């Protein structure tokens, strides 16, 4: 062999060894997955918990393992406020906070979803979340370093406490745990109750020890956190909606290879369809399980009583219009009218 050739081959071998020992072997490099840490605060067997699992499944399949989704449920990684900070700092890549938790981020308009009785049906809600109003709301997150990918349903809320709640006056003077939304604060005050903002992970203990007297949530959250075991009464008021925005760190999202971003967007579409298909069923099943548990009394107000709950809470819409925007409220009411509601 010519000395020239021998030299070249030795050099090539040496470079190969260095590359391998540094972990840059082509195979190792090609296989290092992109990790998406997805943190959330509810149980795995809730609409959000299940939809997150479905997203993981679809995303890992569509990217043939180039993306790995790690889910951290039940506040195991972060509580409500911390998780939004962690997302902005890039410590986690994906979240699905409730729409009532975007106020502290400076995006107050999301609190429109908390306005009592604003959505007369899930169809109205979906016209909002899947149409231009929803897209406009998600766009408001961009300057905060956050990209909004989708809306996921949970459901309509029930009230819980240790007293029977047939009428809104039954909650007078009660300390009620709420999420961080100012609209929810106004709603509880409209009932004569004292609202207390508290992280979701702390609610069970606060109810158990009497730090608060009651709370509101869709049945799926109430049941999976066992809140019904520490609340004597539940009233099916369906007075407000609780849903989620699935969000990612914008820098992370924009930095993904284009084909991966497309695959993940498709996976998100699939997970969202699934979330919105199971949400009502999960809540119905949870309410059934709460009733059957015998640990709490579940009451369904009569039409007359519901009218009284509405009379007490509907003024909140007007009161909060300065905070969330009159135009936004009007746009939602227009969607209701389009479906035949007043
Ligand atoms: C709550 O804090 O009550 C809910 O937002 C929890 C959740 O994410 O469903």
Image: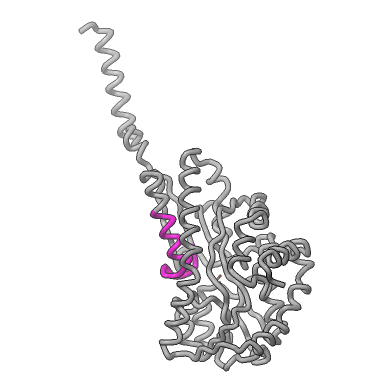
Q: Is residue 29 visible?
A: yes
Quarter of the displayed picture in which ligand 1 can be seen = bottom right
Relative to 132, is 74 above or below? below
Task: Please identify the quadrant where the N terminus is shown.
Answer: top left
113 and 248: which is toward the camera:
113
Q: Is residue 228 left or right of residue 184?
A: left
Q: Which colour style is shown?
A: one colour
For image coordinates 57% across by 93% down, the residue present is 164
For image coordinates 36% across by 44% down, the residue present is 64
Among the 4 quarters of the image, the one containing residue 84: bottom right
Main SS of residues in magenta: helix
Q: Residue furthest left?
A: 1
Residue 318, position as x, y percentages in the image: 78, 73
Q: Is residue 73 left or right of residue 250?
A: left
For image coordinates 59% across by 66% down, the residue present is 123
Q: Residue furthest top?
A: 2
Residue 317, position as x, y percentages in the image: 74, 73
Among the 4 quarters of the image, the one containing residue 127: bottom right
Task: Please identify the quadrant where the C terminus is shown.
Answer: bottom right
Relative to 108, is 309 above or below? below
Q: Is residue 182 visible?
A: no
Residue 114 is one of the magenta-drawn residues: no
Residue 85, position as x, y percentages in the image: 58, 59
Give the magenta range.
40-57
Q: Residue furthest front?
A: 340
Among the 4 quarters of the image, the one containing residue 71: bottom left
31 and 217: which is toward the camera:
217
110 and 79: which is toward the camera:
110
Residue 52 is one of the magenta-drawn residues: yes
Residue 28, position as x, y percentages in the image: 33, 37
């Amino acid at each position: 062999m010519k000395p020239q050739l021998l030299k070249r081959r030795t050099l090539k071998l040496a470079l190969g060894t260095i590359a391998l020992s540094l972990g840059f072997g082509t195979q190792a490099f090609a296989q290092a997955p992109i990790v998406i840490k997805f943190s959330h605060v509810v149980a795995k067997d809730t609409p959000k918990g299940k939809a997150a699992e479905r997203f993981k499944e679809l995303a890992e399949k569509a990217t043939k393992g180039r993306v790995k989704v790690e889910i951290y449920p039940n506040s195991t990684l972060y509580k409500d406020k911390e998780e939004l900070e962690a997302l902005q700092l890039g410590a986690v890549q994906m979240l699905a906070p409730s729409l009532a938790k975007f106020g502290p981020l400076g995006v107050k308009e999301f609190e429109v979803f908390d306005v009592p009785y604003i959505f007369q049906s899930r169809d109205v809600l979906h016209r909002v979340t899947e149409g231009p109003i929803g897209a406009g709301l998600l766009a408001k997150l961009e300057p905060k370093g956050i990209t909004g990918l989708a809306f996921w349903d949970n459901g309509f809320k029930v009230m819980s406490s240790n007293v029977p709640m047939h009428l809104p006056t039954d909650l007078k003077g009660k300390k009620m745990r709420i999420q961080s939304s100012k609209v929810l604060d106004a709603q509880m005050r409209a009932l004569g109750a004292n609202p207390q903002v508290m992280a979701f992970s702390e609610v069970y203990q606060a109810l158990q020890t009497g730090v608060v007297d009651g709370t509101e949530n869709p049945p799926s959250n109430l049941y999976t956190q066992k809140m019904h075991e520490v609340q004597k009464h539940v009233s099916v008021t369906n007075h407000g909606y609780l849903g989620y925005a699935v969000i990612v760190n914008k820098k992370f999202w924009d930095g993904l290879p284009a084909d991966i971003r497309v695959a993940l967007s498709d996976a998100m579409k699939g997970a969202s369809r699934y979330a919105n298909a199971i949400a009502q069923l999960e809540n119905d099943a949870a309410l059934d399980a709460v009733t059957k548990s015998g640990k709490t009394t579940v009451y369904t107000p009569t039409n007359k009583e519901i009218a009284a709950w509405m009379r007490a809470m509907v003024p909140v819409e007007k009161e909060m219009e300065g905070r969330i925007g009159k135009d936004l409220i009007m746009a939602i009411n227009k969607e209701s009218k389009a479906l035949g509601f007043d």
